[in-house]
Image (cartoon, rainbow, N blue to C red):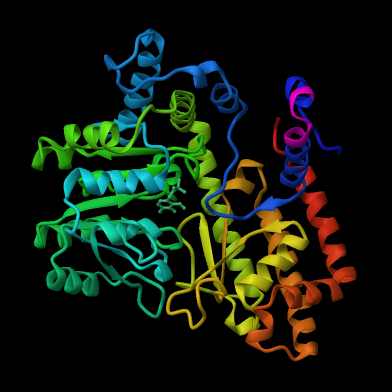
Amino acid sequence: MSIQFKIMKNLQKADKEIYQLYKKELKRQQETLSLIPSENIISNSIKEIIGSNLSNKYAEGYPNKRYYQGMKFVDKIEDLAITRAMKLFDVAYANVQSYSGSIANLEAYLSIINPQDKIMGLDLSSGGHLTHGSPPSFTSKIFKSVNYNVDQNGKLNYKKIEKIALKEKPKVIIAGTTAYSKIIDWKKFANIAKKVDAYLVADISHIAGLIVGNVYPSPVNFADIVTTTTHKTLRGPRGAIIMVTKKGLKSHPDLIEKVKKTVFPSMQGGPHINIIAGIAVALKEASSQQFKNYAKHVINNSKILCSELKKYGFNIISQTTESHLILIDLRNKNIIGNLASEALEFVNIVTNKNSIPFDPNPPFYPSGLRLGTPSITTRSLKEKDMKLLAKLINQTIEIIKTEKAKQKLSFEDEKKKDIRTKIIFNSKSKLLKIKKQVIKLAKKYPIKL
Ligand SMILES: Cc1ncc(COP(=O)(O)O)c(C=O)c1O
């Protein structure tokens, strides 16, 4: 099957450089399989509206309370996005203006606490996000930040989290992850937050689509605020939603106003109305039975991929997965995440290197690999494809492992990009055979244009 392109007549004439680069990127997407768990593929309906003339409109403020004229229809669009989010997630209020998940988290914290107050979130190396108070993030500079970790078995230990909370008395506890494959016990987090009189913010960026698909528990009965990106499992355009739960509103009646004021005018200017319309469309799509089936398949595919990888001797952090995501500890394969992900990219399987809990290596040369199934499930890959994918991943890693062992390379050698490239180059003929199979698989399930 040949690669499909939707000819962009105007762009082709107006800006050849961008057009050609886009064409190459589209070919890359079509011929590769993305196993990056935070990536997905938007529908053509979403694509149409985010690339529309809605981008022309300035809309500072909120529906019926704007600073510009010409808002008749734009107000209705934002209202639809808000009411759809409120209904789908069953919350008291949804703010759909945040530009991204990182900004949404900062806005959530600034709505409820002051600079220098204390926040407590999962450590980056345990699977937390930068914006959960990690040292390189602005969230640890504006606020005092303490972290909790997973245990040696890769799982959250709620007793230990409670102990840290009782000692540190944070004003906000953040529950949510970016590289954790087990189900989060929201109730336990709520009990801990209650004991120390902290707000509970649940960041469901990775799992929002699984939650609305009813295959992962929702935090809305336990958290005060819920934040999410809209472009991961929720399969919408790049953006974010900040939600005030009914529980949060009951104990803090001013919470909606506080969130609104923090997003605009405190942190942001004009909202991206084209994206808000895209979010509205995504929310409509996510409320369908078809989406529920999709969410179920995401988890099925993830579980099958995980168990197949285990058969090949891959060590899985926390042993199994209960979500869209799989975190592999590569130490028994004796290669670092960089070499593994670069070799996999060579065979057109796109993944990301990732730290593992208690990683002996630094974050830029981590010992782990993170995989996920949202994007390939949108492309309709099925159980038998997961088996093939696991086989191809294993073959790739084995080839590279053997080549690295032949060269007797140390960790310091492996950190050098040119040495890693050479290992891959030396294995080229074997890897190309795998690449051919991946391209065949990818072309069998094209991204619909
Ligand atoms: C849990 C979590 N929160 C927040 C974010 C930030 O989202 P964005 O990249 O849109 O700023 C991410 C992104 O990876 C995430 O995984």
Q: Quadrant of residue 418?
A: bottom right
Q: Is residue 17 magenta?
A: yes
The residue drawn where x is 79% and y is 23% is: 13
Provide the residue span drawn in magenta.
Answer: 13-19
Quick check: 142 above or below 27? below
Furthest-right residue in this view: 429
Tell me which residue sits at (79%, 82%) in the image: 403
Q: Residue at x 33, y 59 (%)?
A: 132
Q: Taking the image as drawn, is residue 25 in sight?
A: yes
In this view of the protein, which residue sits in the foreground, 445 or 290? 445
Q: Residue at x 14, y 56 (%)?
A: 198
- In the image, 137: left or right of 430? left
- Direction from residue 183 to residue 326 in the image, left or right: right
Quadrant, the N terminus: top right
Left of 354 or right of it: where is 152?
A: left
Q: Is 316 within the magenta? A: no
Q: Is residue 209 above or below residue 140?
A: above
The image quarter containing residue 311 is bottom right
Counting from the top left corner in percent of width and height, residue 4 is at 80, 33
